[in-house]
Image (tube, rainbow, N blue to C red):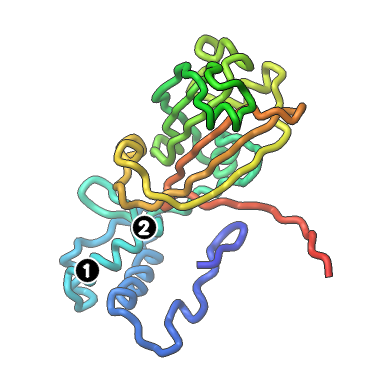
Amino acid sequence: MNHGTHGTPLAPARSGVPEHGRVPKYYLVKAQVEELLDALGPGGRLPTEAALAERYGVARATLRQALRDLLLEGRLRRQGRGTVVAGAKIEQPLSLASYTEGVTRQGLRPGRTLIALDRQSAEPALAERLAVAPGEMLWHLERVLRADEERVGLESTYLPVARVPDLDREFDPTGSLYAHLHARGIRLAGAEERIETVLATPREALLIGTPPALPMLLLHRRSRDEAGRPLELVRTLYRGDRFSFTLDLAASITV
């Protein structure tokens, strides 16, 4: 599906129907269920599988395939023993803005739950990327990301202990790391970021509270300070059914 920068996503061309006109049965059912979701609105509870299968005149297996797609796309979410219509995805800007800033812009309350804050010696690959000597001590900060108390991601950050030696004593792990660094005169000036789709490991899925089969958006970031030195490496998993990313592009096309 093609998405605009903000607001309602653009629909697939010809509603996703192939030119030869042969459409899988589950896809037709999915389109009918989507009309029902629009009518129910966010938070609306879906009828039971049995009731929906009877309503659309299809087998339960066909209906389940349609519902599975809608769950993976983030149109539905599980709530207790039932299924409800999901709200809009969280739009996170691709910028040096912190997670706190991005979520707050959506009118949501950001939060973090600490999993680990410990020291470890830099393995050669980490040391090279952070421009430190192998064996130098690094902080490893791992936190579950929340939006209005819902678990939506998992973030792992590595940064040299020498840059922030009192992180374990002075930093509130439920708050913004970037705000903490800024208050100590450490400012980020740029970053390299790479995005890919992955499946969470069993441990990651357990921490985020999602099925292992749910697609995730994985962001790798290496941030630099004002002197151009690497400051941190970040690996963040975002739930693919709850997040979308936005980026403002400037024209740089030459003819």
Q: Position of residue 84 (x, y in %)?
A: 31, 54
Residue under circle 1?
52
Q: Position of residue 50 (x, y in %)?
A: 16, 66
Categorize mark 2 by other alpha carbons within 10 Å: few (<14), some (14-19), many (20+): some
Element marked by disc 1: helix
Q: Are marks 2 and 1 in contact (CB under 8 Å)?
A: no
Q: Position of residue 117 (x, y in %)?
A: 45, 19
Q: Describe residue 62's horizontal placement relative to residue 23 as left or right.
A: left
Q: Is residue 60 above or below residue 217?
A: below
* Residue at figure coordinates x 41%, y 27% from the top left: 113
Q: CA distance from mark 2 to mark 1?
A: 19 Å
* Residue at figure coordinates x 39%, y 39% from the top left: 150
* Residue at figure coordinates x 57%, y 26% from the top left: 127
Q: Nearer the viewer, residue 202 or 133?
A: 133
- Disc sitting over residue 72 in the figure: 2
Q: Describe residue 52's horizontal placement relative to residue 169 as left or right.
A: left
Q: Describe residue 22's horizontal placement relative to residue 249 as left or right.
A: left
Visible in this render: residue 146? yes
Q: Is residue 139 above or below residue 210?
A: above
Label 2 sits on what residue type?
Leu
Label 1 sits on what residue type?
Leu
- Which of the 4 quarters of the picture holds residue 207? top left
